[in-house]
Structure formats: structure tokens, C-alpha cells
């Protein structure tokens, strides 16, 4: 009897990846990078524990697609960090994995050549190199953890992790978060529902056992301790912002009801600015006002910023790509970023 084809009917190929251990051996963590990650995570934990009064600011491109422009941005941000370090901890957005509403370019790891060749092996290596370069500058990094395997390759170079609006309700992402070594910000859902983020914090704070891989690439049962540093990220939803003081108070009440610490981050982008980048500074100003007027739950903000303003479609001829301009969500430009962060610094110096 001929065995019927029942498996992998819709799979066209498998391509083996180097193991996480292989990639760590090829691009090892350096002392300088290690010091940045350690300090960045410690600073973030201290902010979340209220031992450090500064505001953390996750700021940078919507996605990295050009490491040269990305590093140019990182150098600028590092210089700005020195200026505002008394009031803010700047953490660079280094997003390599993009969750799409339907379809589209899924990020630098998935398709580093942006030509549908999907060289994930190359993307993972380039992503690790980029993170190393940024950490060696002394700038801590933030990323969205989307693929549950990627943290084994990159996790030692990340200081803050986001779980996105499209995956906060996913058990897989809650399990992964329970084992991540960084504080994790859970976004509210795309419909604005914050209860899924609160449930995610509760779930991820607990130990879990689930399928994953180890450093040698073996499929493993991963057992975790639970992550005590989950917090909510308000990103607006269903066409409505949720950064205003009423929405923040409602989020505080929901956290209190769940007996969770009142730690809230506001994403100035996405539905909080109707995806209009020029509105991000207004959101930031509002958040800073709330803090200066005594709010104690707002611990961080997120800003989508790049060298150039706006965004661009990925052209068929990649030589036509505009330098330093997003290929995913539209961003504010560098000058606006500097003005916005300097203004926030000046205001925060007045806080009670
Ligand atoms: O931040 C990025 C986007 O908002 C998210 O990945 C969804 O993008 P899309 O709606 O363009 O697919
Ligand atoms: C995808 C992102 O955000 P959200 O999950 O809030 O849509 C993002 O910050 O890149």
C-alpha cells in the first residue's frame, strides 16, 4: 500500500538554521556589550521598583532595515542620552520582527535582503551583529519578541522586551515572557482592551513549562521561573487613544484590582497618535504634564523615531530606498526627536 501524504502538505521546504550556540560562538557577547545590557536591565528594574525616579524612553525606528542608518541613529541617540540622563533612561527601539495586520515585510530577520529570499539564517546573524554594535556604544536595546525561538539567539543583548498588541493574548507569548531575562511590556490589544495585558502580566509572572529549543538547537521542554517585571503598555486601539489621564486612571484601577503594581508605559505612536507621527510629540507632552502634575504610575514612554520623517514603500529597486526612512510605520525625524526629548527633560526637572 502506498502511504498517503498526510504530513506537511502545505510546507514547501525546511532549511536548517545554525544553532543559537553556533551564533553565540561566531558573535560572542563582549565585555562592553555585557556591561550595557546588565546596567540597562538594572536601571529598568529600578525604575519599575521606584528606586529610580527617571522615565524610561523606548525610542527609535519602527523597524531596522539598514544597519548603517540604524547605527547612525544609535550614535545620535547615545549623544542625546548623555544630555538627558538625569531625567530619562533612553533605550533604543531595535525592532527586527514585525507583526503584520495581514501581510507585508515581516522584518530584517525574516527577510534581510527585502527580496522575498527569506534568509532567516543571514537575518539572525545580522540582527545579532547590529545589537552587539548598539550595546557596545553603551546604549541599551528594546525589541518586540514575536518569534518564540529568536530570544535564544538574541536575548543576551536585549534590555527591554515588548509583546505586541497582536500577541499579548497568545499563550505562547505569555509562556515565552515568563522566561525572558528582561522586563516585559505587554501592549493592550488592537481593539484597546487592556484586560488582555493584565492577564498576560499575571500569566507571565508564573512558572510555565512549554516546548522550545535550547542553545544547542534541541527541541526541549522549557521550564521557567516566571517574570516579575511585566507591565502594561497603553498604545490606544479601535481608533481611540488611551494616554489621557482618564484612561491612565482606569488602567491604574484595573492593575490595582489585579493586585499588580501601578506601572504604566505610554506608546506615543500607533493608535495613540492615529498613526500620524507628527502627533507623537503632543502625546509625549501630555504624558510629561501628567507626571509633572503628580502622576506616579507613568514609568515609561515609547516613541517611533528615525533619521528622516515619515515612511516609504519598499521599492523594487532597493537602490531607490531613502536613507534613514522607515519602511514600516511612519516615524518622527531626528530633529523633532531631539526637540521633544529636550523639552521633556526640561519639564521633568520640575517634577515634585
Ligand atoms: O508597528 C508596526 C505596525 O503597526 C504593525 O506591525 C502592523 O503593521 P501593518 O498594519 O502595516 O501590517
Ligand atoms: C507592532 C508594534 O506595535 P503594536 O503591537 O502596538 O501594534 C510596534 O511597536 O512595532
Image (spheres, rainbow, N blue to C red):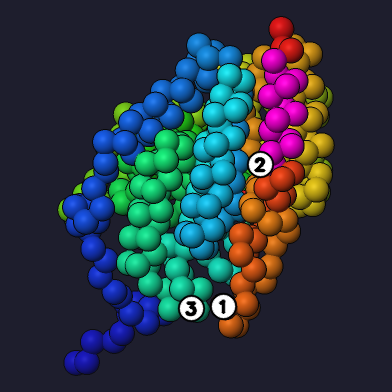
The local secondary structure at tag 1 comes to: helix
Question: Which numbered mark, 3 or 1, is in the foreground of this view?
Answer: 1
Q: Nearer the viewer, residue 96 or 4?
A: 96
The magenta-colored residue range is: 337-349
Residues at marks 3 and 1, CA–CA distance in whole angstroms: 13 Å
As measured in the structure, the alpha-carbon distance from the residue carrying label 1 to the one carrying label 2 is: 27 Å
Secondary structure mostly seen in magenta is helix
Name the residue rendered at 31%, 36% in the picture: 32
Q: Which mark is residue 303?
A: 2
Q: Residue 79 location, x and y as percent?
A: 55, 36
Which residue is tagged 1? 318
Quadrant housing residue 195: top right
Q: Which mark is residue 116?
A: 3
Disc 1 or disc 2, which is closer to the eye? 1
Q: Position of residue 308 (x, y in %)?
A: 68, 57
Give whichever of 22, 92 is nearer the camera: 92
Q: Is residue 292 above or below residue 106?
A: above
Compared with 286, 10 (above or below) is below
**Dot in front, 2 or 3:** 2
| Neighbourhood count class around disc 3 (C-alpha, 10 Å): few under 14, some 14–19, many 20 upward | few
**Which badge, 2 or 3, is on the more N-terminal residue?**
3
In the rendered image, residue 37 lying in the magenta stretch gets the answer no
Mark 2 to mark 3 CA distance (whole Å)? 29 Å
- Asked if residue 324 lies left or right of residue 213, the reply is right
User: Is 340 colored magenta in this rendering?
Assistant: yes
Residue 60 image point, x, y percent: 59, 46
> Position of 135 compared to 185: left or right?
left
Secondary structure, mark 3, is loop
The answer to whether residue 82 is left or right of residue 208 is right
Amino acid at each position: 500500500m502506498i502511504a498517503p501524504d498526510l504530513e506537511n502538505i502545505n510546507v514547501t521546504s525546511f532549511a536548517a538554521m545554525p544553532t543559537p550556540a553556533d551564533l553565540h560562538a561566531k558573535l560572542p557577547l563582549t565585555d562592553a556589550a555585557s556591561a550595557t545590557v546588565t546596567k540597562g536591565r538594572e536601571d529598568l528594574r529600578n525604575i519599575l521598583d521606584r528606586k529610580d525616579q527617571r522615565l524610561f524612553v523606548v525610542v527609535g525606528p519602527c523597524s531596522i532595515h539598514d544597519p548603517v542608518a540604524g547605527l547612525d541613529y544609535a550614535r545620535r541617540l547615545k549623544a542625546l542620552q548623555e544630555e538627558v540622563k538625569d531625567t530619562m533612561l533612553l533605550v533604543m527601539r531595535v525592532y527586527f520582527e514585525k507583526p503584520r495586520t495581514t501581510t507585508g515585510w515581516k522584518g530584517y530577520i525574516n527577510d534581510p535582503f527585502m527580496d522575498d529570499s527569506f534568509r532567516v539564517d543571514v537575518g539572525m546573524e545580522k540582527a545579532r551583529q547590529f545589537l552587539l554594535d548598539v550595546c557596545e556604544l553603551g546604549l541599551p536595546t528594546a525589541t518586540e519578541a514575536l518569534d518564540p525561538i529568536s530570544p535564544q539567539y538574541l536575548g543576551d543583548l536585549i534590555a527591554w522586551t515588548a509583546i505586541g498588541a497582536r500577541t499579548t493574548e497568545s499563550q505562547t507569548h505569555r509562556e515565552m515572557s515568563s522566561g525572558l531575562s528582561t522586563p516585559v511590556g505587554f501592549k493592550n490589544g488592537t481593539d484597546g482592551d487592556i484586560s488582555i495585558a493584565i492577564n498576560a502580566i499575571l500569566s507571565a509572572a508564573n512558572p510555565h513549562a512549554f516546548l522550545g529549543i535550547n542553545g544547542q538547537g534541541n527541541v526541549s521542554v522549557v521550564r521557567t521561573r516566571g517574570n516579575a517585571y511585566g507591565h502594561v503598555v497603553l498604545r490606544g486601539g479601535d481608533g481611540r487613544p488611551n494616554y489621557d489621564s482618564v484612561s491612565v486612571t482606569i488602567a491604574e484601577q484595573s492593575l490595582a484590582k489585579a493586585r499588580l503594581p501601578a506601572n504604566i508605559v505610554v506608546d506615543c505612536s500607533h493608535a495613540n497618535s492615529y498613526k500620524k507621527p507628527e502627533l507623537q510629540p503632543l502625546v509625549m507632552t501630555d504624558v510629561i504634564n501628567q507626571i509633572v502634575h503628580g502622576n506616579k504610575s507613568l514609568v515609561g514612554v515609547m516613541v517611533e523615531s528615525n533619521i528622516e520623517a515619515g515612511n516609504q514603500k519598499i521599492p523594487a529597486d532597493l537602490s531607490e530606498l531613502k536613507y534613514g526612512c522607515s519602511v514600516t510605520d511612519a516615524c518622527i525625524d531626528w530633529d523633532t526627536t531631539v526637540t521633544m526629548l529636550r523639552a521633556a527633560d526640561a519639564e521633568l526637572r520640575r517634577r515634585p
